[in-house]
Amino acid sequence: MSTPELVFFAPVTDSAAELVVNFGVYAGRQATPAEIERLARVFLPDVRALEVVCEQRYEFTQDTEATVYRIRVLAPDAVERAGELRDAVAAWAEDCIQERYVAP
């Protein structure tokens, strides 16, 4: 089984970018409100607006249970800069993970 990417880009429209962070896979926890606010500060100098969704999903099979913590960042008018924003989000996530990693 391959390891999921920490951050990946998913185009939403011709101009809107959605960046998805597999936060829980790497951090072993969900992001704190302070970390989400810090993420917004990374974006706001460069985009006019953004929406951050923190997801907590539960996945079940007959043999396993999993809780998945994921962050989605929707930035209108940011498709042309998706690579640059992906790098900024990845740096933010890596900093958060290094500060407070929780072993599974």
Image (cartoon, helix red, strand yellow):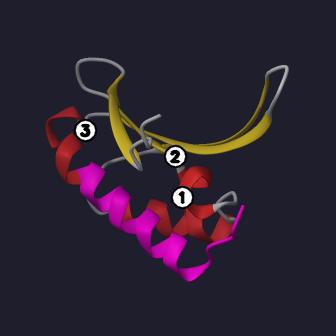
- Callout 2: SS: loop
Q: What stretch is highlighted in magenta?
A: 85-104
Q: Which label sits on residue 78?
A: 3
Amino acid identity at mark 2: Asn
Compared across the picture, whether 26 is left or right of 33 comes to left
Q: Where is residue 54 in the image (x, y as percent from the top left)?
A: 64, 45
Q: Which of marks 2 and 3 is in front?
A: 2
Q: Which label sits on residue 26?
A: 1
Q: Residue at x 19, y 45 (%)?
A: 83
C-alpha distance separating marks 2 and 3:
20 Å
Q: Between 1 and 83, which is closer to the camera in this rendering?
A: 1
Q: Which of marks 2 and 1 is in front?
A: 1
> Please, which residue is most extreme toward the right here?
62
Q: Which residue is under mark 2?
A: 22
In this picture, is 88 found above or below 53? below
Amino acid identity at mark 1: Tyr
Looking at the rendering, which quadrant does residue 30 occupy?
bottom right
Closer to the chain start, of discs 2 and 3, is 2
- Callout 3: SS: loop
